[in-house]
Amino acid sequence: MFLRSFLLFSFVCFYTGLDNGVRGLECKRNLNDPDQVFATLTVIPPPRQNRQENFTITKKYGKRYTSIQAAIDDIPVDNDRWIKILLYIGHYKEKIEVTKSCILLQGKIAEKTVIEFGDHREEENHKDTRQSATFTSNADNFVAKHITFVNTHNYNLYGRGTSRHRYRSGNDVTQAVAAVINGDKSAFYYCGFLGVQDTLFDDNGRHYFKNCFIEGAVDFIMGNGQSIYDNCKIRVLGREEDGGGVGYITAQKRSSDEESSGFVFKGGAVEGTGKAWLGRAWGSHARVIFSGTHFDNIIIPQGWWPWNFLNDTQKHFTYTDQNCTGKGNDTSKRQYNTILTEMQIQQFTNLSYIDAEGWISKQAGQPNY
Ligand SMILES: *[C@@H]1O[C@H](CO)[C@@H](O)[C@H](O)[C@H]1NC(C)=O
Ligand SMILES: *[C@@H]1O[C@H](CO)[C@@H](O)[C@H](O)[C@H]1NC(C)=O
Ligand SMILES: *[C@@H]1O[C@H](CO)[C@@H](O)[C@H](O)[C@H]1NC(C)=O
Ligand SMILES: *[C@@H]1O[C@H](CO)[C@@H](O)[C@H](O)[C@H]1NC(C)=O
Ligand SMILES: *[C@@H]1O[C@H](CO)[C@@H](O)[C@H](O)[C@H]1NC(C)=O
């Protein structure tokens, strides 16, 4: 196959036999390419392909695929060079798993480059929350730009406007993940994550989200990732009018002092149509920091809910919102609020929290997000 032979041509890395890409790897960059990639695989969604029968393949775009998974499958398991998978505008109705390292997945405009599927957690069929995901990234060194990830189970993507009838707003909402991010060194620029419950499963590893949009109602940014959300917009979908209860923005899962994980929101905004807790503790040592974020008037004044750790005599959470603006920024009624010094806050909001060795600036697709 074209790509396989192309890549094997000057292959230098030993095959490691790992299923999910090569761990601890620094991907090679092609310094002669503006995006620093060695090859571009172009994916065109089926309807568009029909309309564009006469689309001619130019050398520049390499091989053409009709599904994103087919392009991923065509990359060697032990890939160690940046490869771009370029998505044409359109809706890709597929469930995707990234198992190869060094992939740059790039759309054109997030609003119009959409990956959607509608699975949900089904205990009776042994399908857990993780398996409900539309998009799963299990490999290190992954970058996505200008793409929207959607789980349509609770969510009508084709509904209009911001009406609450666009999504399940009563008590029949179930866990339905748009994206599980489980590799280390993963970055997302101008991406959207749409769902209602468990939208973004920020599972494990160090992650950087910049200028992203995340929507949901319940635990919609959850997991044990070590992440900075830089200038992201978070939108709470209200459900109270339909008896669905208040929202929970985060459910962070850090479970001991030794774990370095945490969700750090730097700047950006929280808005929406329903009241929400900033977080509830999925792990005993949950860590969530909002710094310099604009809060609309939708934040529950107490801020943080201990959830399963309500009866623990000692609370080990690191929960704080400092230097935030907007009508929801009054911290006087917050519970379990941790006061951090300006210096401590800086240690978390500085990129070095997730990027001591500078991996972000060495990824493909930099710096023209
Ligand atoms: C493709 O090209 C042929 C011949 O030029 C033309 O008859 C046909 O209508 C074109 N198809 C589309 C979808 O544009
Ligand atoms: C407070 O937040 C603003 C952005 O809203 C930021 O520019 C400023 O540096 C922050 N100050 C501190 C002390 O963190
Ligand atoms: C906390 O204790 C109360 C009273 O014993 C009990 O009703 C409740 O279920 C406990 N909550 C949790 C989260 O364990
Ligand atoms: C809340 O935001 C206002 C500006 O919107 C600011 O003056 C005030 O200091 C903020 N309060 C807190 C507790 O950060
Ligand atoms: C961020 O951390 C780096 C490395 O520790 C340091 O050089 C830099 O001054 C820090 N930036 C800020 C704004 O604190």
Image (cartoon, rainbow, N blue to C red):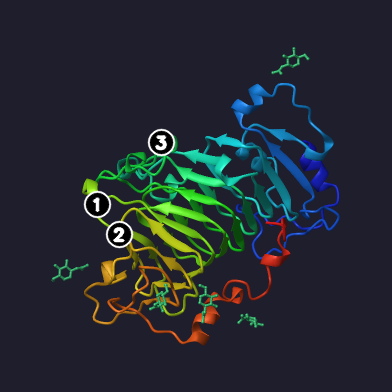
- Above or below: residue 192 compared with residue 285: above
Q: Residue at x 77, y 36 (%)?
A: 1
Q: For numbered disc 3, what is the local secondary structure?
A: loop
Provide the residue designation for mark 1.
Answer: 240
Q: Quadrant of the C terminus?
A: bottom right
- Drawn side of residue 213 relative to residue 45, left or right: left
Provide the residue designation for mark 2.
Answer: 275
Foreground: 36 or 253? 36
- Amino acid identity at mark 1: Glu
Expressed as whole percent of the image width and height from the top left, the position of residue 29 reads: 78, 58
Q: Residue at x 23, y 48 (%)?
A: 241
Expressed as whole percent of the image width and height from the top left, the position of residue 210 reads: 58, 61
**Alpha-carbon span between mark 3 and mark 1:** 20 Å
The mark found on residue 159 in the picture is: 3
- Drawn side of residue 179 relative to residue 146, left or right: left
**Disc 2 residue crowd, few under 14, some 14–19, many 20+, Cα 10 Å:** many
The mark found on residue 47 in the picture is: none
**Alpha-carbon span between mark 3 and mark 2:** 22 Å
